[in-house]
Amino acid sequence: MVDNNDSFIREVNEELRSDQVKQVWRRFGKYIIGAAVLIVVGTAGYRGYEYWQDHRSSTAGDQFLAALTLASEGKRDEALAALAALEKDGYGAYSVLARMRAATVQAEKGETQAAIDAFTAIGKDTSVPQVIRDVARLRAAWLLVDTGTYEQVSAEVEVLAAPREALRHSAREVLGLAAYKAGDMAKAREWFEQITEDNETPGNVSSRAQMMLDNIVASGKAP
């Protein structure tokens, strides 16, 4: 008798649940179907967008590598044309990388002022990530050591020579060289000493700075 009662109760509960499901479906079925469709469409759209993004990135990467190959083969004009196209239509970071590499190719061609102008423009472009802007300013400064004044070099990178700046070692070195070239041995000595006294300076940079300090001392032109 107990088993029969239990079976009856289960059947009643199942009927009630079935009725409840039917009522819910009648009231909200169209919304449930709509939500399901949106999920399917949204997922398909997201996957399609991912594929499109990956395709664009892959294409830009191939174009960048092709331009680098042209430059390494000495086909600099062709490389510059390819980099200009990538700068205009490139995806993601490849556009600014193309600008950086194009400036390097200009320097290799002997178009030093054009390269300096290009690096300086990148350094001032607030749409470019800060780390790339800083590297561009440093590249401009290195070119200016041979062609510009100490003041021009300083305008590019002295801000990068401050303590805790990631590029301070290279910035101090280029400032020291610019001062040395300008004949300001006191200032050159100051920059090179900052390099040798910084415990975080890479060994090769520190060694070059010490050599310059030895030259300055030997010249007898620094106080």
Image: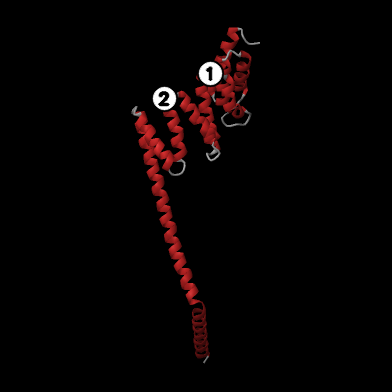
Q: Nearer the viewer, residue 170 or 20?
A: 170
Q: Nearer the viewer, residue 195 or 105?
A: 105
Q: Nearer the viewer, residue 83 or 186?
A: 83
Q: Which residue is mark 2?
A: 108
43 vs 129, left or right, is left
Q: Nearer the viewer, mark 2 or mark 1?
A: 2
57 vs 161, left or right, is left
Is label 2 in contact with label 1 (beta carbons under 8 Å)?
Answer: no
- Measuring from the top left, give residue 12's x and y in whole percent: 51, 87
Q: Element type at marker 1?
A: helix
Q: Residue furthest bottom?
A: 1
Q: Name which of mark 2 and mark 1 comes first in the sequence.
A: 2
Q: Element type at marker 2?
A: helix
Q: Quadrant of residue 169?
A: top right
Amino acid carrying mark 1 in the image? Arg
Q: Residue at x 57, y 15 (%)?
A: 182
Quadrant in the picture for the C terminus: top right
Q: Residues within 10 Å of mark 1 (few under 14, many from 20)?
A: some
Tag of residue 10 = none
- Measuring from the top left, give residue 81's x and y in whole percent: 37, 34
Q: Nearer the viewer, residue 167 or 180?
A: 180
Q: Is residue 9 visible?
A: yes
Q: Is residue 205 above or below residue 63?
A: above
Q: Which residue is mark 1?
A: 208
Q: Quadrant of residue 173?
A: top right
Q: Is residue 44 above or below residue 112?
A: below
- Measuring from the top left, give residue 165's x and y in whole percent: 60, 31
Q: Residue furthest right?
A: 223
Amino acid carrying mark 2 in the image? Glu
Mark 2 vs mark 1, CA separation in Å: 24 Å
Q: Is residue 132 above or below residue 172?
A: below
Q: Is residue 172 visible?
A: no
